[in-house]
Image: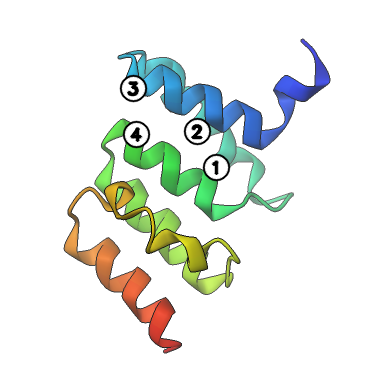
Amino acid sequence: MPEALQAPEVATFLAVDAARQGHKQEAQKVLDEMERHRPGEYVEPFLGIELASALGDRVRLRQWARRAYEERSTYLVYLSLHKYLYLDDPETEAIIAKAHRGS
C-alpha cells in the first residue's frame, strides 16, 4: 500500500466516502483503528468527528467532540462552520458551544 494511503487524514477521507456510499463496515474498521492508535500516538479528534458523523454514530461523535474540547484541537475553530457534522445532536452542539465560549 502506498505510504500516503496510510496517513490518518487520507484514510479518514476515504472512510468517510465509503460510509456515505453505504460501505459502513469498511468505514467502521478505520474508526476502530483510530481508537487503537490513540494510546500511543496523537489522532486529531476532528478526523474522528468527521468519520463518526458519516457513520451516523452519535455516541462516538460525542466521544470525539469531547476529546477535541479536552485536547484543545485547533480544528474546533472550524467546527462551527461544519454543523452538518453534529447530526442534530444536542450534546455534541453543547460541547462545541462550550469550546467556543472558552469554558
- Marks 3,4: beta carbons within 8 A: yes
Element type at marker 4? helix
Q: Residues within 10 Å of mark 1 (few under 14, many from 20)?
A: few
Q: Position of residue 85 (x, y in %)?
A: 33, 48
Please, what is the three-letter code of the amino acid marked with disc 2? Asp
Q: Which residue is label 1 attached to?
A: 35
Identify which residue, 54 or 70, lies in the foreground. Answer: 54
**Residue at the (42%, 60%) spot, across then down:** 79
- Marks 4,1: beta carbons within 8 A: no
- Looking at the image, is mark 2 or mark 3 earlier in the sequence? 3
Which label sits in the foreground, 4 or 1? Answer: 4
Please, what is the three-letter code of the amino acid marked with disc 4? Ala
Disc 1 and disc 2: Cα gap in Å? 5 Å
Q: Which residue is label 3 attached to?
A: 20
Q: Residue most toward the top?
A: 1
Q: Residue 3 has which mark?
A: none
Q: Which residue is label 2 attached to?
A: 32
